[in-house]
Amino acid sequence: MNASRAKALIQQWTHQKKLPSQQLNQALKLANITPTSQHWFGFLDKLLLANGGGLLVIGVIFFFAFNWQQITRFHKFALIESLVVASLAGYSYYFNKASSKVFVLAASVFVGVLLAFYGQTYQTGADTWQLFFMWALLITPWVVLAQFASLWLVWLILVNLSLFLYYQVFHGVFGLIFSGDILQMALFGVNSVALCVWELAATRYEWLKGRSEVRLLAITSGFSITWLMLSFIFIHTAKEAYIPLLYCLWLGIFYSVYRYKVKDLFMLAGASFSVIILSTAWLAEVLFKAKDGAVLFLLALWVMFASGVVIRWLKGLAQELHHD
């Protein structure tokens, strides 16, 4: 039982008078819910480390911005490359400590700075998507070896940016072949595969058990498939008939996994929000075609009704999950 469920259970016992209020603090300590001094020191250590790393990166950026005209090309390259090497040296020196992860993350960021400066200095003519693609490609060995969830998330963001910018470049040239739906389908495929692999790997590797990164992947995946369904509802063609089937498959898998396997209320709330959006869009399409004068009123009633049903279901589900 995790800390949030244990806390909810203790609060329920206190409310039901099964646990005396004077024993509440002792119960919280026994369930490891109340943080100890060691937990506080660990939290402050990570907080100060993250702030220090962020301030270091910001300081480097402002240093270059302020002294850009005075620094020669050679010194610019030398400084950026030195930052990459210094970050890797720090990672090697603090390898057995949590602080080492910040150094490899900083090194990965500085690689992107180096690529951007190289492209700007020599005017290579490369497209923007190639910068992010090469950035992701070059840091891939560090991402694989570092075992750092945040670095994996940075890598996935770079891959998504590469796809998005690739579409922006080639949409004008091959507008008949590429479309916004194709882009969203590509993003949906990449993020859905990443989400599945992440959830499977989290059952084996402890460093992947954090939920923030997984939820961000779920949001991007859900956004893409919801976009595709909205496009199908308002501009539906026969060749896109597979999209509702794909959405139903995604929704069924999503519900099965996060209702019975992983049991994540946030994921179910996001899927419910997607269903409300799409049902409202479909109802609006039908009513506007019928030229009903009370369209907006009916849509408002539907949103309130659907939201109420979903909230009631999620509240009951939250109670059920806390009892597990």
Image (spheres, helix red, strand yellow):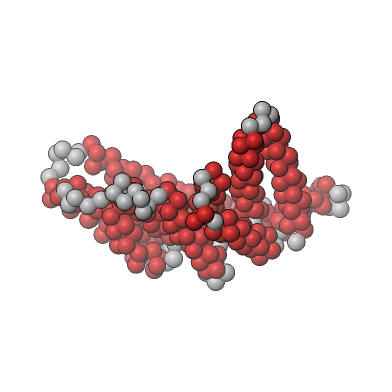
The quarter of the image holding the N terminus is bottom right
- Residue visible at 43% across and 57% down? 186
State the image coordinates of residue 128 (x, y, percent, origin top left): 28, 49
**79 and 216: which one is in front?**
216
Image quadrant assignment for residue 101: bottom left
User: Farthest residue in the right direction?
Assistant: 17
The quarter of the image holding the C terminus is bottom right
The answer to whether 235 appears left or right of 176 in the picture is right
Q: Is residue 295 above or below residue 137?
A: above
The answer to whether 30 appears left or right of 248 in the picture is right
State the image coordinates of residue 256 (x, y, percent, origin top left): 66, 63
- Residue visible at 22% across and 56% down? 81
Is residue 274 in view? yes
State the image coordinates of residue 192 (x, y, percent, origin top left): 51, 60
**4 and 185: which one is in front?**
185
Is residue 207 in view? no
- Residue visible at 35% across and 50% down? 176
Image quadrant assignment for residue 298: top right
**67 and 139: which one is in front?**
139
- Residue visible at 29% across and 59% down? 134
The answer to whether 181 appears left or right of 20 in the picture is left
The answer to whether 178 appears left or right of 279 in the picture is left
